[in-house]
Image (cartoon, helix red, strand yellow):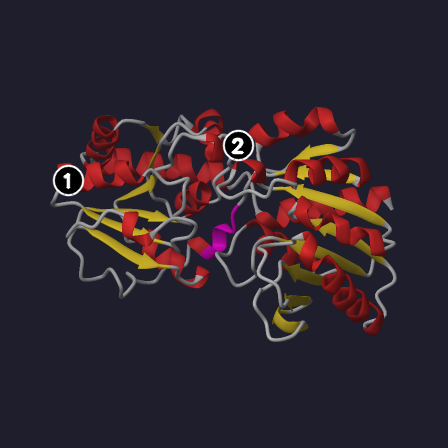
Amino acid sequence: METLVVFSHLRWNFVWQRPQHLLSRLASNCRVIFIEEPITHAPQARLERVVPCAGVQVWRPHVTGDAPGFHDDHLPALQQMVGDALKEQKVTDFWVWFYTPMAYPLASMLSPRGIVYDCMDELSAFKNAPRQLIQRENALFKAADLVFTGGPSLYNAKRSRHPSVYCFPSSVDAAHFAKAAHDHSLQAHLPRPRLGWAGVNDERVNLDLIAAVADARPDWQLVMVGPIVKIDPASTPKRHNIHWLGQQSYDDLPEFISGWDVCMLPFALNEATRFISPTKILEYMACGRPSVSTSIRDVVEPYNDVVAIADTAEDFIAACDAILARDEDRRAAHATALASVVARTSWDRTARAMADLIAQVE
């Protein structure tokens, strides 16, 4: 395989997460062409191209219509743009990798050596999910040579739908998160204790829980790092001790996380979180920081011995109180346990395992 052609609903310059971790590593052995979902309302159809890192090209289609995502209205323009660009670059020996089934119709114009479906989320459960998504996922399952899932819950939900489904949970770049030299300037002025969250703020975050914790402990500072998407920013709780810092660079995350006394995973318990495998939990651990999470299955089952679990505001606050009250010996023992968990996984190892499976099919 000389080239990996990837279709994604996520943009490369969005939050640095599973696609970027895996594909930037796979790019050491093959060219990666990362095709994002279209940007709408363009004066004319065009294909923007950028090179964000070695071995990776990002192709960003611009289309004249207004329908969101890989909509049927855009397919003719997308097929033309992508097809012409692939011919121009003489892409002949390639696999196709899908992050969204909505892009599957574009495979009809391609003749890949194989197809991967990396199912990192149950997209059909997300807010504003396209009505065609389930139908296209069914078709993608029939065509795919390999299916990877983003965690045990997704694996159990998908394993009966394809003969070659493999579970690859979220992992971590431990070295990256162990290198914080100092507190981040955006929070350095904040008093302690500090509770922090780093992630996308959407329908999966329990905003009522955040508000309740802030109200119950006005001396605690809640640092919220990450973009607000798919929800009205006005719906986020505004308090003197809640600090919405927006999307930050992946390079800066260690400085934020290492400056928190407690890390939060304040997920709502709804259909959108039923199958998630949060990347942040291992990033928190790699910084040596303690965490409190709501009862997300892919956190509870593998990590309940090192992560506090609490769903109500009262229990969440009590779990944070217990962490803040620990003595030095207990903090050191917990940090050792977290390091042991982190040592068992890495994005490098995950990417190699995926590449090996592709090589076996070839």
- In the image, the segment drawn in magenta is 172-176
Quarter the N terminus occupies:
bottom right
Q: Is residue 284 left or right of residue 10?
A: left
Residue, disc 2:
275
Classify mark 1: residues with Cα within 10 Å, few (<14), some (14-19) or many (20+).
Answer: some
Observer able to see residue 9: yes
Earlier sequence position, callout 2 versus callout 1? 1
Secondary structure of residue under mark 1:
helix
| 146 and 101: which is toward the camera | 101
Residue in view at x 60 percent, y 53 percent: 9
Relative image position of residue 105 (x, y in whole percent): 76, 49
Residue at the (47%, 40%) spot, across then down = 278
Seen in the picture, residue 309 relative to 348 is either above or below; the reply is above
For this view, does 230 lie left or right of residue 317? right
Q: Is residue 344 left or right of residue 71?
A: left
> Considering only vertical position in the picture, is 218 above or below 10?
above
Give the image location of residue 284, x and y in percent: 39, 45
Q: Secondary structure at mark 2?
A: loop
Q: Is residue 188 magenta?
A: no
Looking at the picture, which amino acid does disc 2 mark?
Phe
Name the residue carrying label 1.
215
Q: Position of residue 307 (x, y in %)?
A: 37, 32
